[in-house]
Image (cartoon, grey):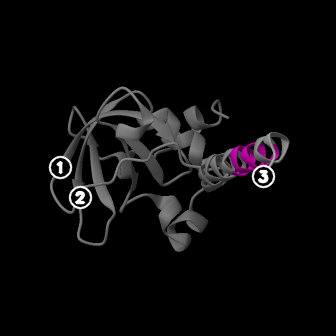
Amino acid sequence: MSYLSKAVLAFTALAGAGFLVGMAGHAEAASGSVCTAQAPAAGVLHGPVLQVEDGATLCVALGATPDTWVRLTLADAPAANGTQRASNTDENPRGTLMAVAFSQTVDCQLQADGRALCALQDGRSVGNLLTTRAAWAAGKEWR
């Protein structure tokens, strides 16, 4: 095999590897979550909320980088319950969760079904706060 053939083969292999790495990053971006740490099976997570994905999903940071942030779905969020969501007038559920929890330190009790009950440091339930008119009003300001 000539030197040129070896160079072409090596370039093709490197380009293919680069494509696969790029596609893996694209798949992560397509999932929508930067929070990649695995939640423990049980227990309480304590940390700041540094990502809010939708009206029922937040990420609790256990460290400085997103690979240490745990994605949790709130068990008591109105957005997680279609019947409850339809009965309120919250126009921006993600914004409401941002207004209530973003940058706040929370304690989240993990449940067997994989969801969590989270409370602010003053003991107020994040899920319960999402049903208040004050939270809805504040949530309108968030994008």
Residue at 38% x, 57% y is 74
Residue 62, by quadrant, is top left
- The three-letter amino acid code for the residue at tag 1 is Val
State the image coordinates of residue 85 (x, y, percent, origin top left): 56, 64
Q: Is residue 143 above or below residue 43?
A: above
- The three-letter amino acid code for the residue at tag 2 is Leu
Question: On the image, numbered disc 3 is attached to which residue?
Answer: 1
Which contiguous range is marked in magenta? 8-16
State the image coordinates of residue 3 (x, y, percent, origin top left): 79, 40
Left or right? Give the position of 90 relative to 84. right
State the image coordinates of residue 19 (x, y, percent, origin top left): 72, 49
Left or right? Give the position of 126 relative to 79. left
Q: Which one is in front, 115 or 65?
A: 65
Instruction: Please say if the residues under marks 3 and 2 sit with CB atoms less than 8 Å apart.
Output: no
The mark closer to the camera, 3 or 1, is 3
* Magenta stretch encompasses residue 9: yes
Question: On the image, numbered disc 2 is attached to which residue?
Answer: 110
- Local SS, label 1: strand
Residue 131 shows in this picture: no
Residues packed near mark 2 inside 10 Å, few (<14), some (14 to 19) or many (20 plus): many
Question: On the image, numbered disc 1 is attached to which residue?
Answer: 44
